[in-house]
Image (cartoon, coloured by chain):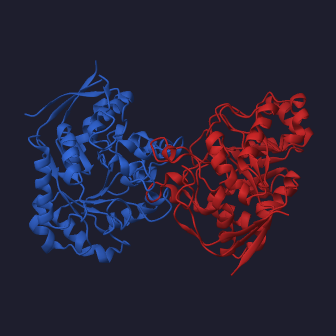
Chain colours: A blue, B red
């Protein structure tokens, strides 16, 4: 039997939603992760200290007595400034920027990326040492949207050299390459983008449960992401982008974007890294890099995984997970909190 | 009011299925088309004269007293030869070649395209003057499959210069370009590939009813198809590839490929051609080119369309059509049979 013990695993891009869905999914992440960066795209989005604190409370209520730190974020608005952000800086792990209308609940996002217009807000983040997380897609053709956004990432990185910019859920070789051109560019990568390409979504039968934004790209893109993750690229972190939608919202015309992976992410990552003989690098990908990049000190949690297969449930509540009903070669054996 | 009268409209690529589905969809095509090339990918596929004749009888029974010619095809098998094909040549409008496993019910198709292996069968078709229709996709990455097949089209066109080869439901600029390099290459284009790109399938919410094979491609591909159709390229014919699946097989994990357009194809084409000021070319695209290329003499039918909007039904039987519940700017005003 092969095993690995992960210390303080972190999910640096997580959708917990709210209400009944929050109560279903939050405990699933809290069970195996030490903490997660919580996306603010609720309806309405989290845009002030009060709603952020209230959301944090609802998350903590949902996870019960699990040891888990919800790292909170605000939904970026260009009118944010130092006066607004400074009082909540200690409670705020990052600010998340969405181009307007680009994904689920992002209608209030940014249109156009005028550096001068963004200077007050991004200057304040830079000064306060708060990272900016960006969903980097243009409104172009679906396979080109991220590639077309890379110059915007680069312009922002140049204009705000002291700002930590996280390219969220990157899906292309172009984004991986950009990491090495700018000291202040970092990235998260999801589980599913390490595993699938557009072929898995639409190359055989259409698979709505693998439909996500950004859409899975070409084999050479997945290969570039996989190499960065497996090699424990120091600027790359795991962020699941686990995005629960009820089954009826996925299996219908107008299927919602999002893959639900939180409860199976660590076993699936362990299997993937083991298959490539890179198990020793998993700790960097799922925790150490994020701790260093964000300056986090997450609650202690040891997760022991072994190559004992697990059968993935068909559903968690009304949410169909990735690999529903299938077997993953690894499983969580024990979780201990010191 | 603007109008157009189409004479003997033909759908040169049609899936009528069998049984209850045949009885739902065949009358819908028979109402507005004068004839259609009937795809042979039943389960099991149509591979001999007897099953072809029996299928033709079931189609004629399903359409009742409509004036409509089902142009019959066989599912290509490499073992076909002159002795086998000659006796049924008069009843056979074309033979349809599927690469193995590439689309719905194509498991028994061709693997590899060895010219010498194919010579007996394709030589026989060539000698008998029977066109070969090909679903031209490789097993590669979904966005590359048709592009990668173009060299195979070209090799076959060169090896069998007297064989009429129809590139079915082309979706790429590369296929359009190949038409002008080989005198014996022709193509069909669907309605949906003139209207949508991958953006419409997966660029916003996922739209399973627009999921088809070959998958819709890039904007520049659609533009090339549109120009060929609107300009009445003499080697291009309308073939709907209308492919009915029951709603439950489209709105589920493992959604079947196919867009159901037969009943709305002529109004939607009239609207499209009118919008581009090319209404006068529609007759070539929906009939004259096919008559010339295939040497057909279809039953007389005049279809009068006007720019009076129609509301598309939510369903035909259990099949959801393209534009379900939406309005099309044109409609069929009258059909007359001389």
Q: Tell which of B170 and B292 is nearer to you.
A: B292
Q: Where is residue B206 in the image (x, y as percent from the top left)?
A: 46, 54
Q: Residue at x 68, y 61 (%)?
A: B225
Q: Residue at x 32, y 48 (%)?
A: A246
**Numbered disc total:** 0
Give the vertical position of B236 relative to B133 (above or below). below
Q: Residue furthest top?
A: A1
Looking at the rendering, which quadrant does residue B162 occupy? Answer: top right
Residue B71 is left or right of residue A185, and the answer is: right
Q: Which residue is drawn at 13% across and 74% down?
A: A83
Q: Can residue B333 be seen in this view?
A: yes
Residue B310 is left or right of residue B121, and the answer is: left
Q: Can residue A296 be seen in this view?
A: no
Which part of the image, by quadrant, shows the C terminus of chain B? bottom right
Give the vertical position of A2 relative to A102 (above or below). above
Q: Position of residue A123 (x, y in %)?
A: 23, 70
Q: Tell which of A287 and B296 is nearer to you.
A: B296
Q: Position of residue A134 (x, y in %)?
A: 32, 60
Which part of the image, by quadrant, shows the N terminus of chain B? bottom right
Q: Which residue lies furthest to the bottom in this view?
A: B1
Give the vertical position of A202 relative to B193 (above or below). above
Q: Which residue lies furthest to the front in this view?
A: B65
Residue A247 is left or right of residue B30, and the answer is: left
Residue B147 is left or right of residue A39, and the answer is: right
Q: Position of residue A336 (x, y in %)?
A: 12, 31
Q: Residue at x 37, y 52 (%)?
A: A249
């Amino acid at each position: 039997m092969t095993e690995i013990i992960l210390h303080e695993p972190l999910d640096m891009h997580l959708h917990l939603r709210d209400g009944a869905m929050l109560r279903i999914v939050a405990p699933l992440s809290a069970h195996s992760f030490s903490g997660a960066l919580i996306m603010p795209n609720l309806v309405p989005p989290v845009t002030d200290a009060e709603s952020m604190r209230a959301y944090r409370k609802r998350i903590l209520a949902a996870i019960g007595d699990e040891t888990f730190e919800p790292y909170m974020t605000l939904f970026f608005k260009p009118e944010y400034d130092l006066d607004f952000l400074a009082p909540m800086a200690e409670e705020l792990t990052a600010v998340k920027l969405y181009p307007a209308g680009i994904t689920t609940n992002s209608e209030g996002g940014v249109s156009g990326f005028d550096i001068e217009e963004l200077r007050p807000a991004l200057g304040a983040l830079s000064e306060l040492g708060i990272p900016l997380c960006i969903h980097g897609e243009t409104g172009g053709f679906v396979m080109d949207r991220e590639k077309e956004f890379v110059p915007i990432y680069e312009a922002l990185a140049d204009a705000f050299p002291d700002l930590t910019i996280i390219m969220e859920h990157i899906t292309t070789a172009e984004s991986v390459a950009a990491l090495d051109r700018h000291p202040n560019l970092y990235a998260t990568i999801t589980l599913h983008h390490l595993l699938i390409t557009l072929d898995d979504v639409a190359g055989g039968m259409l698979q709505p449960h693998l439909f996500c934004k950004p859409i899975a790209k070409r084999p050479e893109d997945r290969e570039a992401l996989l190499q960065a993750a497996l090699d424990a690229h120091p600027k790359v972190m795991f962020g699941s982008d686990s995005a629960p939608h009820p089954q009826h919202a996925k299996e219908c015309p107008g299927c919602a974007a999002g893959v639900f992976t939180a409860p199976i992410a660590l076993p699936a990552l362990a299997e993937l890294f083991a298959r490539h003989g890179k198990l020793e690098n998993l700790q960097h990908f799922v925790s150490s890099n994020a701790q260093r990049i964000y300056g986090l000190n997450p609650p202690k949690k040891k997760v022991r995984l072994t190559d004992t297969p697990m059968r993935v449930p068909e559903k968690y509540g009304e949410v169909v997970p990735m690999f529903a009903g299938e077997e993953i070669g690894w499983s969580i054996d024990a979780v201990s909190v010191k």
